Amino acid sequence: MAGVCVDEGHELLQSLTVTIGATVPTGFEHTAAEEVQEKIGATARVSKDRGRIYFEITTDHLHKVHHLKSVDNLFVVVKHYDNYQFKETKEEALLDLQQLAPVLTWNNALEVWKMNNSLKKKRSRKRGAAAPKAKPSNATDPEKPQAEPDASELKEKPGSSCTEQEPGPEGEQESDIQEAEAKPLKFRVTCNRAGDKHSFTSNDAARDFGGAVQEFFQWKADMTRFDVEVLLNIHNNEVVIGIALTEESLHRRNITHFGPTTLRSTLAYGMLRLCKPQISDIIVDPMCGSGAIPLEGVIEWSNSFFISGDNNDMAISRTVNNINYIIKKKQDGGSTSPGLSIDTAQWDLCHLPLRTSSVDILTTDMPFGKRMGSRKKNWDLYPSCLREMARVCRPGTGRAVLLTQDKKCFTKALSRMGGLWRKSHTVWVNVGGLHAGVFVLRRTAALFGSTPEDVREPHIGCESQEINMEEEKVQSARSE
């Protein structure tokens, strides 16, 4: 729905109501919907296709969607078909997609795309990065325009949008507009298809729909250095056409030093939301890896205190480097905060240097037994891990949120800890193609030392947690 131009200072913004789509870690759709309601005040709808949510906003709230921590990618919806009827033959189905492109109402979505580009420029200027980074020279490939295209490029009707007055050095805006007018926009179509009743492939749909988009807009196709990414999402009979608002996934936002199994930041944030952290909570990640979970936590819940630990010195080094990166990033952004409420320690998971009943929340990504550790070692590690976590966790109020793909081993270990832990619920997620579970546990009111589960088995250390250093170096090199 188009609105009117509203004068706000020196800028003119058009008031639009649009539908925003977001991809989220599979299994955390409802967690992401809660965050949207909390931070934007919009009611999100979970898609039939797992891993996506949709919500309506007005464009004056567009900047808020980029502050969502549980979403990987964002896009504005051009058109949504809840029950699209595909033709039976491949040729007819693809012809329908070709004929669909010129009849869609693109204006509002492209206006949001322009506004989004303006927001990205403002964020760059605030970070002191007004000058764009130099790109590798390529004589055959024209440089990407630095300004949004004008209305004629976007096939909009005269007067259908407001001209945005972008602040900047004198003459910058004029030169940008001239450059945009001189060069056509570059684009690509990305198709994500799910379902077994389609007569065509994702590549078929992207090629034919993209050809129709190119003919309609007279844009230039470019698979790598594109200005506009058109999305064609097909899930059985649900079809959503959109325009991407993010250039790359947001899940890598806080990590610069990656390990062999670094957890996605969006998944880490989802796990923390399940913990429901409160002010002054002590939150521990006893197997922190690269520190994804405590880093997400300390940024969002700054009134809690986070402790990250691991038995591997390489993991500790990565965590410290990632923490220092966030501190420097805050300082470069003008923050006067002295630091982050986080600390890091190297320890033996089975003998944590923490007082009994001193921790409010434990959350970690446990070894799956595939790229790290082994399934055989997990049978020793998991019971010892749950027992030590129960010792340091506060009885009655403490909780734990633990991620693992070794569900059989974890369930067996948990059954042996019935006097110390109670499972609240499980969230099933997709982690790199693996079906894993996020187990939400509650600490029972039993004091540690008063139940049969407290009796330790003969100490074998935490050899099952340790892995060969040379093996990790090889894995780290492969992943990085």
Image: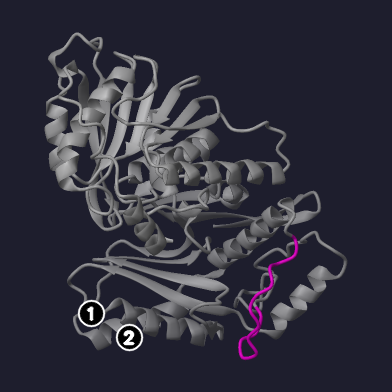
Question: Residue 54 location, x and y as percent?
Answer: 41, 52
Inspect this view and state whether residue 54 appears.
yes
Which residue is the site of mark 2?
Answer: 95
Which residue is the site of mark 1?
Answer: 87
- 217 sits left or right of 127 in the view: left
| 433 or 53, nearer to the observer | 433
Element under disc 2: helix
To which quarter of the image does residue 479 belong?
A: bottom left
Magenta segment includes 142 = yes
Q: Residue at x 40, y 50 (%)?
A: 264
Magenta range: 130-143
- 255 sits left or right of 338 in the view: left
Question: Residue 50 location, x and y as percent?
Answer: 29, 54
How many neighbours does mark 1 have within 10 angstroms: few (below 14), some (14-19), or many (20 or more)?
some
Quadrant in the picture for the C terminus: bottom left
Q: Residue at x 75, y 65 (%)?
A: 131
Element under disc 1: loop
141 relative to 28, above or below: below
| 26 or 45, nearer to the observer | 26
To which quarter of the image does residue 13 belong?
A: bottom right
Inspect this view and state whether residue 32 appears.
no
To which quarter of the image does residue 153 belong?
A: bottom right
Residue type indicated by callout 1: Lys
| 292 or 181, nearer to the observer | 292
Looking at marks 2 and 1 on the same chain, the residue that comes earlier in the sequence is marked by 1
The reply to whether dot 2 and dot 1 touch (C-beta < 8 Å) is yes
- 139 sits left or right of 480 in the view: right
| 160 or 11, nearer to the observer | 11
